Amino acid sequence: MATLHPFEPRHRPALPAAFTRSELSQMLSVYGRRVADGEWRDYAIDNRDGVAIFSIFRRSQESPLFAIVKQPAEDSAEYALFAGPERLDSNHSLSDLLATLESRPRLIQG
């Protein structure tokens, strides 16, 4: 007679990744200020492979200038700021990460 064993997955599936309304509000506040200054013109939100990504563009046809990546965890989330492939900062606080983004040099229009 066959013995049945309970099924146990080999690895835990990724937690669903999405930005909350509060997180979107914080990011769009920073984005809106830079749009008003003429620096940024477009953004995109993407969810894939257990991460949520908020990408910022100078022009919609270009590669993103910056990307804010949220990777959820059991107890909290980790946020990372990228400029192209370069990781500029990571933090467990989105507001601290956005402060890093705002402290970066800004484009001066002449």
Image (cartoon, rainbow, N blue to C red):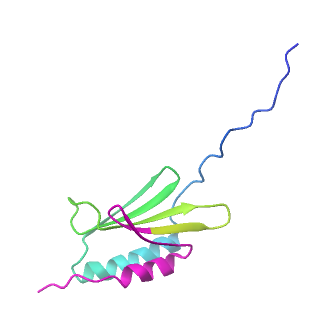
**Residue drawn at point x = 20 percent, y = 58 percent:** 61
Q: Residue furthest left?
A: 110
Which stretch is magenta?
81-110
Q: Quadrant of residue 78?
A: bottom right
Q: Which x, y percent locates residue 37?
A: 24, 83
**Rendered position, 50 above or below 36:** above
Please tell me whether residue 95 belongs to the stretch shown in magenta.
yes
When asked about the image quadrant of residue 40, the answer is: bottom left
x, y (%) of residue 29?
39, 80
Above or below, 61 against 26 in this view is above
Which quarter of the figure is the N terminus placed in?
top right
Q: Residue 82: percent from the left, percent from the top?
A: 38, 67
Residue 76 falls inside the magenta stretch = no
Q: Is residue 28 above or below residue 4?
A: below
Q: Where residue 30 sits in the image (x, y, percent)?
A: 38, 80
Q: Is residue 46 left or right of residue 50?
A: left
Q: Residue furthest right?
A: 1
Q: How many marks do you count on the picture? A: 0
Viewer-proximal residue among 110 and 86: 86
Quarter of the figure with the C terminus: bottom left
Q: Residue drawn 51% across and 70% down?
A: 21
**Going 53% across and 61% down the picture, which residue do you hit?**
71
